[in-house]
Image (cartoon, rainbow, N blue to C red):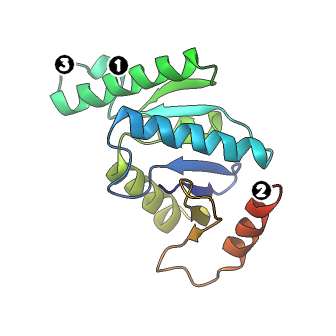
Amino acid sequence: ERIVFLEPIGRKLIITAPVGIDEGWTIQQKHDLVTRSVRLMERIGMGTRIAIMSGGRKDDIGRCKAVDDTIRDALELVDILVKEGYDAYHSEILLENAVDEADLIIAPDGISGNLLFRSMHFIGGALALGAPVINIDKVYIDTSRAKKDYRDSIMLAMRLTEGKR
């Protein structure tokens, strides 16, 4: 399971997940991504507001079964997370708001998350520090094959080792 640290131009550092195309396809997988991400975020002093994205707005229910499923999954996950004490909300499909309102953005699935990362980084110019693997005990930062300079990824790895037990 990977998350990615992104800093959109003129905005704060955020985390997005899932980024692997085979990750985040179930409510449980997304829940696991959230809980592991929040633990890491708290450890390094980040905020922990969570935006759960879906494939549409609530008003879009009924237009397409696939979109309906993402909205229902997002609402169910938000309900679970809020009951567990997390600061989570359904951001619908509104990424443009989520980047300012949240610290962690959970895409509807791994393909959407990967597209979100690629759009923000390669087209939108967001700085991508790296993608830590969060379901292992070691610090491992995955990077894009297109990355030319790894200094920020090395700095991220060093930061993630601080206070690690």
Observer able to see residue 99: no
* Apparent side of residue 44 relative to residue 140 in the rendered image (left or right): right
The image quadrant where one finds the C terminus is bottom right
Residue 51 in the image: state x and y as whole percent. Answer: 54, 33
**Is the residue under label 1 in contact with that under label 3 (CB below 8 Å)?**
no
Q: Amino acid at mark 1?
A: Lys
Q: Nearer the viewer, mark 2 or mark 3?
A: 2
Residue 91 in the image: state x and y as whole percent. Answer: 48, 29
45 or 71, nearer to the observer: 45
Q: In which quadrant of the rendered view does residue 42 lie?
A: top right
Q: Amino acid at mark 3?
A: Gly
Residue 2 in the image: state x and y as whole percent. Answer: 50, 57
Please report whichever mark, 1 or 2, sits nearer to the chain's N-terminal start: 1
Query: Which residue corresponds to mark 2?
Result: 164
Q: In which quadrant of the rendered view does residue 61 lie?
A: top left
Query: Which residue corresponds to mark 1?
Result: 58
Query: Which residue corresponds to mark 3?
Result: 62
Dot 2 falls on a residue whose secondary structure is loop
* Apparent side of residue 26 relative to residue 104 in the rendered image (left or right): left
Please report whichever mark, 2 or 3, sits nearer to the chain's N-terminal start: 3
